Image (tube, rainbow, N blue to C red):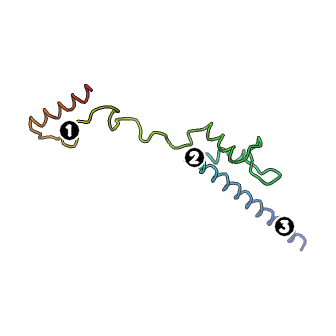
C-alpha cells in the first residue's frame, strides 16, 4: 500500500513538472513569435535551455534578464531568424529606379512579329538601356 502511494506521489510530481515545462516552452515560443521570429522551432531549440524560472516563478535567462529582453537580445544577435527584409531573390528586378517606362509590353514580343513591330520593340529596348 505504501509503495502504491509513493508511486502515485511520484506520478503527480512528474505530471506537475511536465505541465510546468510545457508552460515554459509555450511562453518561450510566444515570446519568439512576438519578436517576429520566422523559424520559431529552430530558434526555440537554440534558446530553450537558457531560459529558466527564478525563485519568484518568472521566466528569466541564465544571466537574469526577463524573458522578453532575453529573446530580444537573441534576435538582435541572430537576425537570420527574422523574415527577409527584401522580398524576392536574386535575378531580374521589375525595373530600375528612375528608368523611364517603355511603351512596349514584353508580352507583346513573340515569334511572327512584323518587321515594324520588331523594330519598335528593339527601339524601346535600346532607349530603356540608354537612359
Name, please, the residue furthest toward the top: 130
Above or below 65: residue 118:
above
Name, please, the residue furthest toward the bottom: 1
Q: Earlier in the sequence, mark 3 or mark 1?
A: 3
Q: Secondary structure at mark 2?
A: loop
Q: Position of residue 91 (x, y in %)?
A: 37, 35
In the image, 30 versus 18, the foreground residue is 30
Dots 3, 1 in contact, CB < 8 A: no
In the image, 16 versus 1, the foreground residue is 16
Q: Secondary structure at mark 1?
A: loop
Q: Is residue 79 left or right of residue 95?
A: right
Q: CA distance from mark 3 to mark 1?
A: 79 Å
Residue 120, quarter of picture: top left
Residue drawn 60% across and 38% down? Answer: 78
Above or below 2: residue 51:
above
Instruction: Report which residue position mark 3 lands on.
Output: 9
Q: Position of residue 95 (x, y in %)?
A: 32, 35
Quadrant location of the N terminus in the rendered image:
bottom right
10 Å crowding of disc 1: few (<14), some (14-19), many (20+)? some
Instruction: Report which residue position mark 1 lands on.
Output: 104
Q: Earlier in the sequence, mark 2 or mark 3?
A: 3
Q: Position of residue 62 (x, y in %)?
A: 76, 43
Instruction: Report which residue position mark 2 lands on.
Output: 37
Q: Secondary structure at mark 3?
A: helix
Q: Is residue 94 left or right of residue 119?
A: right
10 Å crowding of disc 3: few (<14), some (14-19), many (20+)? few
Residue drawn 43% across and 42% down? Answer: 87
Residue drawn 87% across and 71% down? Answer: 5
Q: CA distance from mark 1 to mark 2?
A: 42 Å
Q: Position of residue 43 (x, y in %)?
A: 61, 45
Quadrant location of the C terminus in the rendered image:
top left
Residue 128, quarter of picture: top left
Amino acid at each position: 500500500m505504501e509503495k502504491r502511494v509513493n508511486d502515485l506521489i511520484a506520478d503527480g510530481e512528474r505530471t506537475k513538472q511536465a505541465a510546468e515545462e510545457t508552460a515554459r516552452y509555450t511562453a518561450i515560443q510566444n515570446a519568439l513569435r512576438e519578436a517576429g521570429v520566422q523559424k520559431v522551432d529552430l530558434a526555440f531549440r537554440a534558446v530553450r535551455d537558457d531560459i529558466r524560472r527564478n525563485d519568484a516563478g518568472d521566466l528569466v535567462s541564465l544571466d537574469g534578464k526577463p524573458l522578453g529582453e532575453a529573446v530580444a537580445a537573441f534576435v538582435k544577435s541572430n537576425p537570420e531568424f527574422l523574415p527577409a527584409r527584401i522580398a524576392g531573390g536574386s535575378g531580374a528586378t521589375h525595373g530600375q529606379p528612375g528608368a523611364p517606362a517603355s511603351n512596349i509590353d514584353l508580352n507583346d514580343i513573340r515569334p511572327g512579329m512584323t518587321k515594324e513591330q520588331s523594330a519598335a520593340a528593339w527601339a524601346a529596348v535600346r532607349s530603356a538601356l540608354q537612359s
